[in-house]
Amino acid sequence: MDNIAVIILFLFLGIIIGAVAIIIINHFRGVNAQHKANKLLEDAKKEAERHKRDSLLELKEETYKLKQQTNDEIKEKKQELKDSEDRLISRENNLDKREEMLQKRDITLEEKENNLLVKQQSLQEKEDKMDKLLKEEVQELEKISGLSKEKAHDLIMSKVESDMALEIAEYIRDEEAKAKLVANDTAKQLIVSSMERYADDVVAVQTVSTIDLPNDEMKGRLIGREGRNIRTFESVTGVDLIIDDTPETIVISSFDPLRREIAKITIETLIKDGRIHPSRIEEVYEKTCKDVSNRITEIGNNAITDLGITKMDPELINLVGKLNFRTSYGQNALKHSVEVANLCGIMAAELGENITLAKRAGLLHDIGKAIDFEIEGSHVEVGEQIAKKYHESETVIDGIVSHHGDRDPKSVIAVLVSIADTLSAARPGARNDSVENYIKRLEQLEEIGNSFAGVEKAYAMQAGREIRVMVKPNEIDDTNSYKIAREMKEKIESEMQYPGTIKITVIRETRAQEEAK
């Protein structure tokens, strides 16, 4: 027991000693921490003081710089203001000088104006005197002649007009007679010779094609179940298929002859084959398009070969072949172009021009009609673009752009193309024309003939190719007949559109009759 008590006592004493030691150690640690904290505070204060001094120095330097910069700017502004002031002063001086000059000029102008007024008054007085003298002279002349001024003027003018009209008419008649002696016979011989040496039939193709059927049952097969065959055919070919009550006949309608031809061949092939359904229609149509394309190339090659033309672009040859499927007033465009080419070649040979070049220009003069429905512009403008695209010669282009008189021809061959084009279109049977247009043209021709003073009656003859004008013999003499014919020719050319030429014949007849009893 005593040992345990001793142990406990020593343990208790150890705890007390340890606690006292810990307290003492913590006290010394607190003192050291306080010292360190004080030292840190002093260091921070010193650092803050140092930064404060540096900041003050920087602020002073910045303030000084700003002050210097402000002073410099103030000096510059002052200098600019001074310069502006100097310029204003100089401008004011210049304005003062200009004002003095203007004042002097105003004074000078005023003096001149006064002088002019004086001179004007003097001139006016002189003019009044002259007018008075002229009036006195005119009155004296009127007394002497017995005619007033107006009557004398009208008499002189009518006399001059009458004399000049007769002289002009006689001059025109004499010059025309001289020209006809040389040119008329030569031109007639050349044109007639060309027309005699070449003539060709023209196939008139309308806007519809008729197809004969083996029997009426074929109409139902072409229509198909619920109309599917005819709808497919029209959508693929782009034409209208007309199936009516006409026995064993159907009609294909389209304004495009090439589409109509392809559709006709397609439907004829389907009828022969007997298999008519949508897929078969598309198959036959594609094959027909290829065949027609080859046929177009063949037609173009045949045309240039027959004319003896060589070295032509293949695409241009295809365009020539396409003309076979175009018409103008019912006249086949390719037949017309070949006819024009032959006529050009014949006339070129007679005149000693290049025959091959003339034929080439004649063949290509209407080449624009091959695609004029595909792009904008007249067939003349389109033809010019095509010829330039395929590097045709200037002579060929000149023939294309001038064959309708839109531009003046620059070469002899271009004139030949225009003549041949007119001959081919104007010959009887070459073109179809509606009765309405025909009658309208005849009425317009007679109306122009009857519009001239002194004309008794005008008659359109030879299907509008000739007009005969009966004049009043007591009002129109032989010389004025030539004048009326020429003026009528100019009026017809300016107001009417017609193929070929119109012959104008002015007839003046005087009859004296007596009856013996």
Image (cartoon, helix red, strand yellow):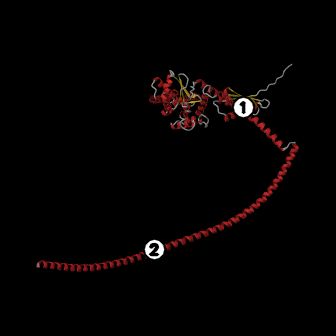
Q: Amino acid at mark 2?
A: Lys
Q: Which mark is residue 449?
A: 1
Position of 25 relative to 177 (above/below)? below
* Rendered residue at 76%/37% (across/down): 164
Q: Position of residue 14 (x, y in %)?
A: 17, 79
Q: Secondary structure at mark 1?
A: helix
Q: Crowdedness of circle 2 by 10 Å Cα count: few (<14), some, many (20+)?
A: few
For the residue pair 270 and 202, the one nearer the viewer reads as 270
Q: Position of residue 162 (x, y in %)?
A: 78, 36
Residue 349 appears in view? no
Lateral position of residue 267 relative to residue 516, left or right: left
Q: Position of residue 302 (x, y in %)?
A: 50, 27
Q: Secondary structure at mark 2?
A: helix
Q: Position of residue 346 (x, y in %)?
A: 57, 27
Position of 130 relative to 509 (above/below)? below
Lateral position of residue 105 relative to residue 429, left or right: right
Residue lying at the far front of the rendered structure: 1
Q: Amino acid at mark 1?
A: Gly
Residue lying at the far top of the rendered structure: 517
For the residue pair 171 and 515, the one nearer the viewer reads as 515
Distance from disc 2 to disc 1, alpha carbons, whole Å, reads: 105 Å
- Residue under numbered circle 2: 65
Quarter where residue 150 is shown: top right
* Rendered residue at 44%/74% (across/down): 62
Q: Quadrant of the C terminus?
A: top right
Q: Quadrant of the N terminus?
A: bottom left
Q: State which tag comes first along the sequence, 2 or 1.
A: 2
